[in-house]
Amino acid sequence: MITSSAHSDCTCELYRTLRSGEHQVFDIPKLFRRKPVEVREGRVFEIDPRAKLLRMRGETREDFKYDRLIVATGATRLRTDLVGLEDLLQHQNPLEPRIFHARSNKQVSELRYALRRLGWQNKSAKKDQFVVILGGGATGVEMAGEIAAMRERRSSGRVIIVEGRYEPLKPALGTLAHKLLREQMRKMGIEYFEGSSAKRVDAKHLHLENGQMIPWDLLVVAQGSSPDVKLFGEFGDMWTEQQQIKVARDFHIEDWSGHYALGDLAHYPWAKQELPRTAQVASQQGTYLADLFAAELLGEKAPSTGFRWQNWGYLVSLGPTHGAGKLGPLPLPVVWGPAVDVAKRGARWRFDAEVFSGLRL
């Protein structure tokens, strides 16, 4: 297993880093302790699928020959096509940054310090201060929830989400949980602008496509991301419009035997539907592929049913005491309030225990 960091940020729990200041990480060597898995820390910068060769930079530069390759790099490179954003990033004061990407513990910790500098929890502040989040998906909403909870009842602290689509979380949450979530956001004073994307940003205002201007003091980028296309250049043109790799029924990359893609990177329609880009989907795909390899190595018959996704539900947190979601594929049971935080902690424990013990919980 090759990973760029042995202590990988747990991006699905960045909101806890913002809440507590303690980094939420996967200690990858610890997870695989006492297992026949060799963890190598480094960054792969070239893949040669014809020679079945990887080139990696770590403490030293190394080349790896392989028989099978599984790529599960996800989508990690942020889109920064917002006009003016790159220029602001290049010229912002590194000691007092105002723009943050919600993709790493480092960035979220810097956001936490910036909120303190802004006097976010100063109840006597009278001037309106604006924290604007670009992206109304789960990450953006959870960031907004934590920021709103930190402000408590201070009315001059404005938390604003800008999302180009309408109700992006509704398909995952279901009608009832989505309604509960939006109602809690309203009560927490989180302002939600949807249906018009951000077009341009300058040092003071965010300009939307519909002509609206939103002032900002801190800007949090929680939009979608795209894969490192150049890394897979030797595979040829195999990308979908959604920038995913086309894979076959057993997840091997089309036209490339012995090469597989999983998770956010893989375009794998199931039961005529697009699978959500979530950790639970990637986890189940990995389990299926491991069973497939084990059966082949043991000379057993491979599973005939193919991959089947089990929907465990979806949870969105809004600070320590709010949130909404559902458990399982049906609209009910729906959970909300503090129960969401408890359920999300349970899901994290379940994942860690499954990897560490090898049990199918």
Image (cartoon, rainbow, N blue to C red):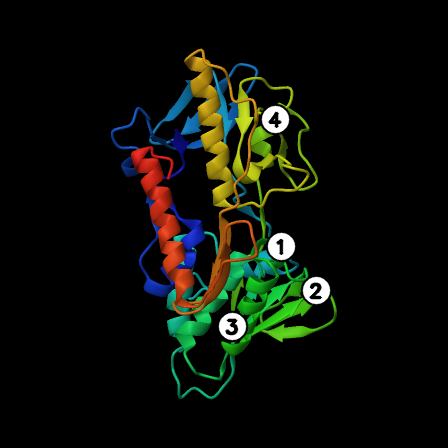
Q: Does residue 218 appear left or right of residue 339 in this picture?
A: right
Q: Residue furthest top?
A: 299
Which mark sits nearer the N-terminus, 3 or 1? 1
Say what secondary structure mark 1 lies in.
helix
- Look at the numbered discs 4 and 3 and tell me whether their residues touch, using CB distance below 8 Å: no
Badge number at residue 184: 3
Report crowding for label 4: few under 14, some 14 to 19, many 20 or more residues within 10 A (C-alpha): few
Q: Which residue is mark 2?
A: 195
Kind of residue at badge 3:
Gln
Kind of residue at badge 1:
Pro
Which mark sits nearer the N-terminus, 4 or 3? 3
Which mark sits nearer the N-terminus, 3 or 2? 3
Q: Nearer the viewer, residue 185 or 201?
A: 185
Q: Nearer the viewer, residue 24 or 294?
A: 294
In 3D space, how far apart are the residues under numbered discs 2 and 1 (Cα atoms)?
Answer: 16 Å
In 3D space, how far apart are the residues under numbered discs 4 and 2 (Cα atoms)?
Answer: 36 Å
Q: Which residue is mark 4?
A: 249
Q: Nearer the viewer, mark 2 or mark 1?
A: 1
Residue 350 percent coordinates (x, y): 36, 45
One can see residue 83 in this view: yes
The quadrant the C terminus occupies is top left
